[in-house]
Image (cartoon, helix red, strand yellow):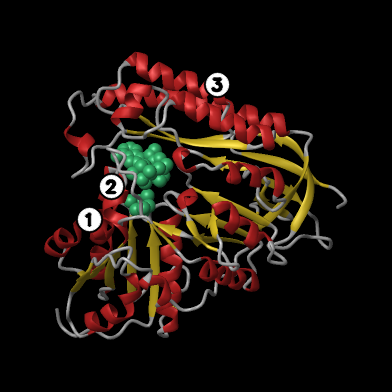
Amino acid sequence: MTDIAPPKTYRVKSFGCQMNVYDGERMGELLEAQGIALAPEGEEADLVVLNTCHIREKATEKVYSDIGRLVKAGRQSGRQPMIAVAGCVAQAEGEEIMARSPAVGMVVGPQAFHRLPDMVARAARGERSTDTDMPENNAKFAALPARRKVNPTAFLTVQEGCDKFCTYCVVPYTRGAEISRPFNDLVAEAQRLVDAGAREITLLGQNVNAWSGTNAAGHAAGLDGLIRAIARLPDLQRIRYTTSHPNDITDALIAAHGEVDQLMPYLHLPVQSGSDRVLKAMNRSHTAEGYLRLLERFRAVRPDIALSGDFIVGFPGETEAEFAETLALVDAVGYAAAFSFKYSPRPGTPAASMDGQVPREVMEERLARLQSALNRDQLAFNQASVGRTCDVLVERRGKLPGQWLGKSPWLQSVFFEADEPQGAAIGDMVRVELAEAGPNSLRAVRIAA
Ligand code: SAH
Ligand code: SF4
Ligand code: F3S
């Protein structure tokens, strides 16, 4: 590589989970603190950060096709952007990317991206660099500038990494060991987000409910304690958290759902399978029955709680009868929303070399059946909400004039009309009655607050 001009503009493309999106926002803030501006919409950036995801094969393939596209576009315009590969593929396949893609100027892992500005400076001098260190402390967070985000809904990573080692999953390898960020830092970051305009904060972690810390009074606190502390911030109207693991659910967290007004009636609790044999092979260390009992306890304190889950079909060895147990679990729960995936063998994970890999056609057929059950339940949940009054936190304008879009407490997408001059504004909490349900959204009518 030869010397290239230091970048003036950047763009971050995030491909992964909410934690990946959060990291992407923080990388943007970091670059802005160096005087590199977000590229205007539709314009090519001098620096493109591909913030990648390694969770399934398809997600990983995207990085190589994106690099190819950027190189081609650069050749056509005569201006090659500087390319940084960040995120979980960077962590897992950093060296391979460097070897395969000479256009990539730097590779930086999810725990090292605070060093991005330095790497950009080196890339401008023609030096390619890789940093996939995983410091054991929270070095990354301490080195980041203050939050500048202004959207009404904000993410806040409270916990990094994963110690669960589900046999199909790359996250423990790409994100490292579980680390909880300190209580005081989190309350301070939440305050800054609220000051910058956030009305809803979603606390993030791959095992967010494994968060633990020491509160301001010096006492041990769990996620419920953190939620209660953040709920005391004036002007913060909504709190959510994701993703939880069934084994880290505490009585205190369940109780918080019945007591903290700002904590929204929504729980994303992945289960993956309804078969105890498969759950064991996945190293999930909970049973289907144990999972159902947990959900009952949430429903006891918060009867309207919307439940969501993640599913994998076609885990190695999964039989038709075991898949039927997953369908039975879905019927028993009645999910408001869910995410379901075909099993994807990931390099280096124990499941990738297990016997009984399920043929693709079988996986596809099972996924279709599962998704039709989940879609049916999602529509039923939305239909059952019709007639309810609730607040909608307005996130953006809708497609039609006078139309606004936001989320209900149950995380449903809701659109309503608010004619000028009364109008509405992004960040408003608007009282509505839910009037009509579709599979993916609801139409609502504004009512007097
Ligand atoms: N930490 C969270 C979610 C991790 S990743 C949890 O434990 O629930 C998000 C989802 O991706 C998982 O819940 C799982 O359903 C899916 N997933 C992870 N690895 C996968 C793989 N190898 N193949 C298919 N789906 C996978
Ligand atoms: Fe992956 Fe399991 Fe950890 Fe979730 S709990 S991130 S699925 S290893
Ligand atoms: Fe993907 Fe990494 Fe998140 S693998 S799902 S971006 S933790």
Q: Nearer the viewer, residue 222 or 172?
A: 222
Identity of the residue drawn at 15% across and 62% down: 95
Disc number placed over residue 332 in the picture, else none: 3
The image quadrant in which ligand 1 is located: top left
User: Could you give the CA–CA distance between mark 3 and mark 1, rounded to whole angstroms?
Assistant: 38 Å
The quadrant in which residue 334 appears is top right
Q: Is mark 2 within 8 Å of ligand 3?
A: yes
* Residue 336 in the image: above or below residue 356: below
Q: Residue at x 57, y 32 (%)?
A: 295
Please state, as top left, top right, bottom left or bottom right, where the N terminus lies in the image: bottom left
Which three-letter amino acid code belongs to the residue tagged 2?
Val
Amino acid type shown at disc 1 = Ala
Q: Does residue 371 appear in the picture of this structure?
A: yes
| Secondary structure found at label 3 | helix
Which mark, by number, is residue 92? Answer: 1
Callout 3 environment at 10 Å: few (<14), some (14 to 19), or many (20+)? Answer: few
Q: Nearer the viewer, residue 38 or 316?
A: 316
Residue situated furthest top in the rendering: 321
Q: Secondary structure at mark 1?
A: helix
Q: Nearer the viewer, residue 274 or 391?
A: 274
Residue 289 in percent (x, y) is at: 48, 23
Distance Cα–Cα, label 2 vs label 1: 9 Å
Q: Residues within 10 Å of mark 2 (few under 14, many from 20)?
A: many
Residues at discs 2 and 1 in contact (Cβ within 8 Å) = yes
Quarter of the rendering containing residue 293: top right
Residue that lies at the very extreme toward the left in this rendered image: 99
In the picture shown, does residue 73 fall above or below 402?
below
Q: Is residue 18 above or below residue 168?
A: below
Q: Position of residue 357 (x, y in %)?
A: 21, 26
Q: Which residue is mark 2?
A: 170
